[in-house]
Image (cartoon, helix red, strand yellow):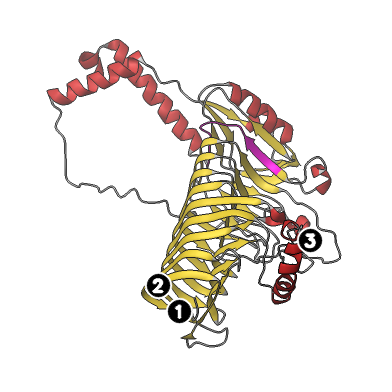
């Protein structure tokens, strides 16, 4: 049919193109079976397109002309077919032994090729020691994971770098996709954590997967479980999409953040189910233009901006939107946490359309955050310049000493401003559902509560009771129905 219509050259080009598409689809769809140890995949996000039934298009001269034009363009600019680099072809066995070298050799060839697919096939478990996939590559690359990648169980394998297991760095247009599993094999690390065993010294543990300095990055459909520490980290990346991810570790596993965003701009995190022993999502310094939507969190510590300003450092986070989220049994809901003595800001933040179910601290800003063995004492300014002369010393001596005793002179703080809480409802596991513990020297400013309805529900009590709000050093406004209300401003 195509021969008289288009001529032999175009016909052959069309048939070749269709053959390539069918072959690639056949190869990449062979792993559609279910995994016995993983929940069913999350439903994909609907595109919103509507199907039109009963509509048929007649073969016409106009259609023939359009088709001829399209195919002529394809023939003049042929699409290069993807080249598949299967780790099995490079010696990966998936038999419990280390497959790191096979993965390195596969990456070397795939990265130096054009239009490449790095394939981790299904139905096998590949063990890896710490490994780095470094760019730049010759062209954007698809890293397709259909099987399971599991971390080496030997802590000694991490002697050179205890902070990372898998790193993707300096890559443009990378896509990491599939229905496979990335398993951090973290139980041994948890048992050696100082948060689990108080007699042990505190040591670093690896982040399972780190994306470092990647641009136009897409991570989609994967399952992350049992990370040694954090599951997934985006560090100094730009233009990122993290979609339809499933992240799971036990609720008592220490420091196992789900998704960690640091120094990253223009990132969308969408339709993710996160169950961990720490923050489901943490956003720290250098990050801006962050959008998180459709997040289901619990167990875990909620979604956190911070911590910021540890060790008197400067931190900056801005333009963050968390929209449409559900928290179940978490220690926190939406939280901003900063250390005393830090500098910088967390500003222009929106938390909206959120449901809380038995959450201990549904809404919280804590500018006195402390996560260390020794208690954090309230810090005060001790500037020598104010007392550099005898006259100044005599003037300020009495006032200064009184202020120290009353803790009214504080050190610097990370400024928290322009934060909106809108349409947040549900139950609090504690009596205090809204807690603003802000700095005396740099109060929280521009805080808006709109349409908030949080009630207190005890563990053994089916009845709901009025929740409370604790608000210190905060300048805020209320709109719509807000419960509980701050007693003092």
Indicate whether residue 332 is drawn in magenta. Answer: no
Q: CA distance from mark 2 to mark 1?
A: 8 Å
- Image coords of residue 137 (percent x, y): 58, 25
Gap in angstroms between the C-alphas marked 2 and 3: 46 Å
Task: Give the residue drawn at x 57%, y 36%.
Answer: 214
Magenta stretch: helix, strand or loop mostly:
strand
- Is 7 on the left or on the right of 401, as rendered? left
Q: In this view of the protein, can residue 155 be seen by the observer?
A: yes
Residue 191's disc number = 3
Q: Which residues are magenta?
A: 165-177
CB-based contact (under 8 Å), mark 2 and mark 1: yes
Q: Give the residue number, with chain letter if any, for mark 1.
A: 485
Q: For residue 152, which quarter of the picture?
A: top right
Instruction: Find numbered disc 2 in the image and state the secondary structure of the residue it sits on.
Output: strand
Q: Is residue 243 visible?
A: no
Q: Is residue 426 left or right of residue 338?
A: left
Q: Is residue 49 left or right of residue 253?
A: left
The answer to which quarter of the image holds residue 373 is bottom right
Q: Residue at x 19, y 47 (%)?
A: 53
When asked about the image quadrant of residue 324, the answer is bottom left
Nearest to the observer: residue 359 or residue 345:
345
The first of marks 1 and 3 along the sequence is 3
Q: Real-space Cα distance between discs 1 and 3?
A: 42 Å
Name the residue located 65 percent from the left edge and 25 percent from the top edge.
108
Q: Residue at x 81, y 40 (%)?
A: 160
In this view, which residue lies farthest toward the front? 391
Q: Is 441 drawn above or below residue 33 in the view shown?
A: below
* Residue wearing tag 2: 478
Q: At numbered mark 3, what does the secondary structure look like: helix, strand or loop? A: helix
Residue 85 on image: x %, y %: 59, 28
167 in the magenta segment? yes
């Amino acid at each position: 049919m195509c021969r008289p219509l288009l001529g032999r050259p175009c016909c052959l080009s069309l048939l070749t193109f269709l053959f390539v598409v069918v072959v690639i689809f056949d190869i990449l769809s062979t792993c559609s079976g279910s995994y016995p140890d993983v929940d069913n995949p999350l439903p994909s996000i609907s595109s919103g397109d509507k199907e039109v039934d009963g509509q048929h298009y007649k073969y016409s001269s106009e259609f023939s002309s359009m088709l001829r034009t399209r195919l002529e363009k394809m023939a003049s600019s042929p699409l290069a077919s993807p080249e598949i680099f299967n780790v099995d072809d490079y010696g990966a066995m998936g038999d419990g032994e280390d497959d790191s070298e096979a993965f390195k050799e596969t990456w070397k060839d795939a990265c130096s090729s054009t239009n490449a697919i790095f394939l981790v096939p299904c139905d096998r478990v590949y063990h890896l020691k710490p490994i780095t996939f470094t760019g730049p590559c010759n062209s954007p690359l698809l890293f397709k994971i259909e099987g399971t990648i599991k971390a080496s169980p030997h802590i000694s394998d991490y002697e050179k770098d205890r902070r990372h297991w898998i790193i993707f760095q300096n890559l443009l247009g990378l896509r990491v996709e599939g229905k496979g599993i990335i398993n951090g094999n973290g139980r041994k690390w948890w048992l050696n954590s100082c948060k689990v065993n108080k007699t042990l010294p505190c040591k670093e543990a690896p982040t399972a997967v780190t994306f470092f300095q990647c641009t136009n990055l897409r991570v989609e459909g994967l399952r992350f479980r049992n990370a040694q520490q954090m599951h997934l980290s985006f560090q100094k990346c730009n233009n990122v999409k993290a979609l339809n991810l499933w992240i799971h570790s036990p609720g008592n596993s220490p420091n196992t953040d789900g998704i960690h965003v640091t120094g990253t701009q223009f990132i969308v995190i969408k339709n993710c189910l996160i169950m961990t022993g720490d923050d489901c999502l943490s956003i720290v310094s250098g990050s801006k233009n962050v959008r998180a939507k459709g997040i289901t969190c619990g167990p875990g510590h909620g979604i956190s901006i911070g911590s910021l300003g540890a060790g008197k450092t400067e931190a900056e986070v801005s333009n963050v939107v968390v929209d449409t989220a559900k928290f179940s049994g978490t220690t926190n809901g939406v939280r901003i946490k900063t250390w005393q003595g830090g500098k910088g800001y967390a500003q222009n933040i929106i938390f909206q359309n959120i449901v809380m179910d038995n959450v201990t601290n549904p809404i919280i800003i804590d500018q006195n955050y402390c996560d260390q063995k020794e208690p954090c004492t309230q810090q005060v300014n001790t500037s020598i310049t104010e007392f550099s002369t005898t006259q100044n010393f005599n003037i300020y001596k009495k006032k200064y000493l009184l202020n120290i005793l009353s803790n009214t002179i504080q050190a610097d703080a990370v400024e928290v401003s322009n934060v909106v809480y809108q349409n947040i409802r549900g139950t609090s596991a504690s009596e205090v559902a809204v807690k603003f513990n802000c700095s005396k020297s740099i109060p929280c400013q521009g805080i808006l509560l709109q349409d908030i309805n949080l009630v207190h529900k005890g563990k053994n009590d089916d009845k709901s009771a009025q929740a409370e709000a604790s608000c210190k050093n905060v300048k805020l406004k209320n709109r719509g129905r807000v419960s509980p209300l701050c007693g003092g401003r």
